[in-house]
Image: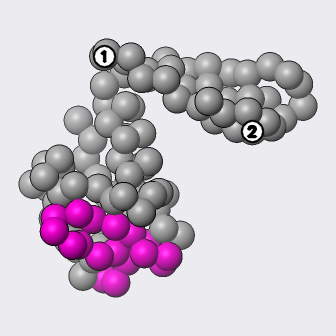
Amino acid sequence: AALGPSATGYFRLKDKALRYKWKTSQPLFETELLGIDEMKLEEIYLALRTNLGLSLRDLSDYNQVRCESWAGRGLATIDNEIFRLNAKGYLLLDSLILELKIT
């Protein structure tokens, strides 16, 4: 659960998810229903924001190549097929994610 101004929460259901964000000026929140593609993007973002990393086995060949490219550019490491962004890659995450194909 997410509490406090601008906090964001995420509830996953079977084939959809609900994301909510608390408003900063009122004790109310906004909700957004996510489909399969948005859920996959949320999972990738979460994995890349943590030290748990992202399993390359869970990605398409195209996205694996993108991740390997980022590691080659010094933005991440790959250890036992787990991809983890470093500090520089984390700073560029919003730009990097645009290179992936999420379908």
Q: Quadrant of the C terminus?
A: top left
Quadrant of the rendered image containing residue 40 = top left
Q: Quadrant of residue 86?
A: bottom left
83 to 2, vertically: above or below: below
The answer to whether the residues at label 2 and label 1 have Cβ atoms under 8 Å apart is no
In the rendered image, residue 51, in percent from the top left (x then y), is placed at 42, 63
- Residue identifier under label 2: 6
Q: Is residue 47 above or below residue 14?
A: below
Q: Is residue 66 left or right of residue 29?
A: left
Residue 55 visible, this angle: yes
The kind of residue on which mark 1 rests is Asp
* Residue 84 on the magenta segment: yes
**Which residue in the protein does label 1 denote?**
15
Residue 37 pos. (x, y %): 31, 31
Q: What amino acid is found at the position of numbered circle 2 in the picture?
A: Ser
Q: Which mark, residue 46?
A: none
What residue sits 45% from the left and 58% below the top?
A: 50
**Quarter of the picture holding the N terminus:** top right
| Residue shown at the point (75%, 38%) measured from the top left | 6
Q: Which residues are magenta?
A: 73-89
Q: Residue at x 34, y 75 (%)?
A: 76
Q: Is residue 63 visible?
A: no
Check disc 2: other Cα within 10 Å, few if <14, some if 14-19, many if 20+. Answer: some
